[in-house]
Image (cartoon, grey):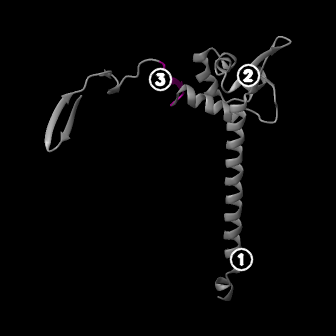
Amino acid sequence: MIRVFRVNGLISVLPFTRNYNVTTTGTRRTGSGGGVRGRMGSSSIQLSEPQLVAKLLELFPLENSWIPVSKWAQSISDEVKELLVAYNGLGNFVGKQNNFFIVRTENGVKVVSLTTMGMSLCQRRQKKWNIERVRSDKFGQRRDFRRGSSNYHDKK
């Protein structure tokens, strides 16, 4: 791959070969920063570790303070479960994310709760969702009001 740079009217051509993979015609990601790739039929999902944590925070049931990992895993979609296979399952992945989740064992069962940071992120997301829902309801009421006040079509 060749990169062309123009600086002060001069053109510089530099060969760019760092981490270039000819088979994929793109840069190859090395290390753990590349994310986890999974195949689900004809579609593929690529989520990095922070994106996977965000997805799990979305799926965490806020009504329960402590929830068994097995019960939580039942409510997670198959796509996310397939991504968690690379991390040896939901319990191990959540156990490594100690900034967001608290994992402990009660009577031989792994249970999970949110840390203060995880809880505040979930509450902020819930608040944004509620505000958006209220806005859409108000917008719908405005549209209904405008539709009802028009007598143009009734006079014809």
With respect to residue 99, does 133 lie above or below? below
Query: Which residues are drawn in magenta?
Result: 32-43
How dense is the environment of label 1, judged by Cα within 10 Å: few (below 14), some, or many (20 and up)?
Answer: few
Q: Earlier in the sequence, mark 1 or mark 2?
A: 2
Which image quadrant: the C terminus? bottom right
The residue at which mark 2 appears reads as 102
Q: Secondary structure at mark 2?
A: strand
Residue 49 spot, x, y in % from top left: 56, 25
State the residue at coordinates (65%, 83%): 153
Q: Are marks 3 and 1 in contact (CB under 8 Å)?
A: no
Foreground residue among 35 and 65: 65
How dense is the environment of label 2, judged by Cα within 10 Å: few (below 14), some, or many (20 and up)?
Answer: some
With respect to residue 115, does 146 lie above or below? below
The residue at which mark 3 appears reads as 33
Residue 79 spot, x, y in % from top left: 61, 28
With respect to residue 89, does 41 lie above or below? below
The residue at which mark 1 appears reads as 148
Give, as a three-letter code, the residue at label 2: Ile
Residue 57 spot, x, y in % from top left: 67, 32
